[in-house]
Amino acid sequence: MRSFACLVVLRSTLLCLVVALSLANVLFLGSPTQAATASPAATTVTAVASGPWSRSSTWGGTLPSAGANVIIPSGVTVSLDTSTASLGILQVDGGLSFAPVNLTLTARAIMVHGWLRAGTAGSPYVQRGRIVLTGSDTGEDIMGMGSKVLGVMGGAVDLHGRAGVTSWTRLGANARAGDSSLTVVSALGWQPGARIVVASTDFEANQAEEFTITAVTLTPAGASVLALDRPLAYSHWGSGQTFGTRRVDERAEVGLLSHNLSVEGAVADSAGGYGGQIMVMNGGAFRMAGVSLTRMGQKAKLRRYPIHFHMLGSTPTARGVSYVKDSAIVNTFNRCITIHGTNKLTVSGNVCYRHIGHGFFFEDGAETGTNLLNNLGLLTLKPEAGQAILPSDSETPATFWITNPHNVMKGNVAAGSAGMGFWMALPEHPTGLSTNTTTWNRRTALTAFSDNRAHSNTHGFFVDSGPRPDGTTETTYYDPRSNPADPQSAPVNAVFSQLVAYKNRYHGIWLRGTHHIVDNSVLADNGMGATFASEYSRLSNSLVVGETANLGTPETWTAPGLGGRSLPQPWEAAFPIRGFQFYDGLVAARGVSFFNFVPNSQRNASGLGFLLDNQFSLHPGNQSAGLTFVNANRVWLPPLQPGFDGDSSALFTDTDGTVTGTAGARVMANNPFLMAGACTYRSSWNAQVCPPGAATYLRIATESISGTTQQLHPVRFTRPDGAAQTLDGYDPSATSVTTTAVGHTSYRVSFAGGIAPTQTAYRVINGVGQWVQFAIPYASAPSRITRWGCDIADASSWCYGGAPTSLAQLQQSQVDSAFYDAAAGLLYVRLKPSDEYDQLEVVR
């Protein structure tokens, strides 16, 4: 008798010898421990000749029966012309094809080393076909693929259902709660009995609804009216809105969930989340189009996903290209499509609905060259406690989890997630099985990211918080360079174009890094349109709308906003909506139109604003140009409060006057410490508008260098005119404080303990061409003052600052220098930076 294990366990001679010791009991039953209690051993049936499955001579006289393990050897081709019994393990070393009749293939596992076909791209399978994977043995591990698996181990699988069927479309008219029909743009190939899902067009992702179509009617205009098996519970937006010359499209997506060809986890043994899985490895190829998958993936199990391309390297392989197209992956227990150590796939036109954890998932960050096109993902769910594969799955699961920018991402929709829509989560280097230190993900240029849309998520588009090797995440700075291996090479703009973000509870867009451009995009009905925790970045040529006519359907558990509108954060009805937020810097809004940011009795609103409750200082060069405001409060800044140093230093320049009416005017927090010249307070903005040319601005900072335990903050800076700013630091353990300040000015510095820490840095940021001077109480002359470790008192040093003998002489210095006034007990530190970041370090 031929040992099945010798056929499936990687053709390893040593393993074959080991397995042969317990032939009959172990061959198909898993581990030796399991085999000891199993009885009797499963029957093995081997095809002896090519031919139909239903012909006994194909099997040497006896057809495979329930529980049998089946082998189709190399060189043998079987035509599946009848539905099978519920098989054990089906191994295909030769070929297996679906005949053009209605069929169900049921097995505990299917292992393909040869080929399996149910239709091809050129000749699709048009009957009703099912592949059903059975079993509940979570300990079984077949060739490292686990159990309940359609495994492609070096072979090729083609599954092609009916062609020319619309995979997903959009509503063609508004649908109201209580309606029993939908008008959609296109429903080619949709028939009565088909299952569909309608995406939420509100903040709550769970407003997605499933229906069965009972009738399809074509309208004279070419749209389709779908009669439904029950009324809608929620309203779904289905019409366009025009603002100026731009259009806001918040029409609900409608996805087809059922196709004529399906791969399923068996109903009887999948209820607990132990579904089927498809795994492709060892040079295999997998091609799927027009197929539905359901009850797939295995809850909380690593590497057990609905579809898993595992460590294939660059495709095509010897078995040809791989792709997943125009298919539906529905009600899955662990992700949607996992791309792991595999390049150059095409994943297009698919619907991924109701999945647990990250959905479209690039696993290690080494995956490049894939075309991710026109996919729809909706209802991305958090795992139950203790069942997350990654911490980020349970914290903020993403419909699209993208770990390498070197992929093409166009036309995709994230239509409802408990976390992120699109999360560009970049590791420093690839992790997991792809670990290397030569690939620099956070400095890799963005290949293409355009025409994607995100709605009904917590955050829409999120570029930050990349994974560490242990799976946790850290704050991430995406800094694309012409040579990723060289951080000093020329920067490359990462252009995110034609994005649409609406009805996201927090941010439509959040970016952290440098040289980011969001262009020609539409943001509407978000808690906050766009926030750039970036520098040298901008929002350009875009439309930002505070509130549209899409009121949504407020949930019963929360009070609605005015006029019955859903609120982005209903637990905080007073949450102020804002279109573009300045944060960090240097960032800008250019050529942007703002509509419908109108304050009301419930909450404030503004086109421009700053990150709320901000503890960090901002770039003083942030700016705007070419802005348009229609029915919109232009700016709103929050009242100042202790502990939020960043709020106190908020400032941007209206370069062309399209915000304030005066080119070059500065809009800033209502803080005398920032003001210069005859500023004007605008109450509806809670902001000061100061005249152009009245002052230059930079950032000043002090830091207690590591090694000292002396209290640093609060620190108080006082200008000669008495205007002062007290800084608390970003938290109680902070060792530094920073604020925006007027340049070409002297400041008195006062520390909480009355004296400076033992080792203190005095710093200027973003102040090239300006000077600033600090006067700090010191009981005696410092022992040492250095610039980047170089003693400024050493006349032979590169950083020589001289030894001024008076304050007047110090003030004439053209380099960083210091003077100690023993009589006054003051150390004067003067900085005249030639770079964006300069400091002197003082040791008492």
Image: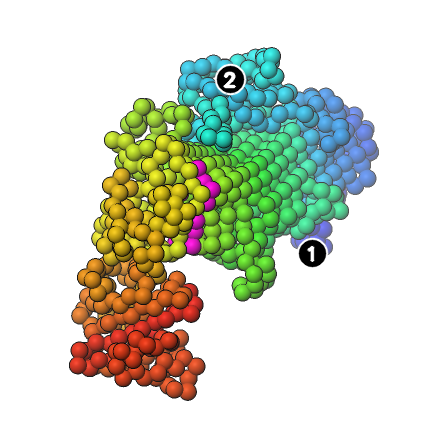
Q: Nearer the viewer, residue 253 or 675?
A: 675
Q: Is residue 823 above or below residue 128?
A: below
Badge 2 density bin: few <14, some 14–19, many ≥20, Cα 10 Å: many
Q: Is residue 100 above or below residue 827?
A: above
Span shown in magenta: 580-593
Badge 1 density bin: few <14, some 14–19, many ≥20, Cα 10 Å: few
Which labelled disc corresponds to residue 182?
Answer: 2
Is residue 191 visible in the rendered image? The answer is no
Which structural element holds mark 2?
strand
Q: Please provide percent x and percent y for residue 385.
A: 39, 42
Which quadrant does the C terminus fall into? bottom left
- Identify the image quadrant of residue 179: top left
Which structural element holds mark 1?
helix
Which quadrant does the N terminus fall into? top right
- At a point 33% along the width and 42% down the height, the residue shown is 635
Q: Looking at the image, do the residues carrying marks 2 and 1 touch, with CB atoms under 8 Å apart?
A: no
Q: Please provide percent x and percent y for residue 38.
A: 58, 39
Is residue 219 visible in the rendered image? The answer is yes
Instruction: Name the kind of residue labelled 2 in the image.
Output: Leu
Q: Please provide percent x and percent y for residue 636.
A: 30, 42
- At a point 58% along the width and 30% down the height, the residue shown is 328
Q: Nearer the viewer, residue 770 or 411?
A: 770
Name the residue tied to disc 1: 14
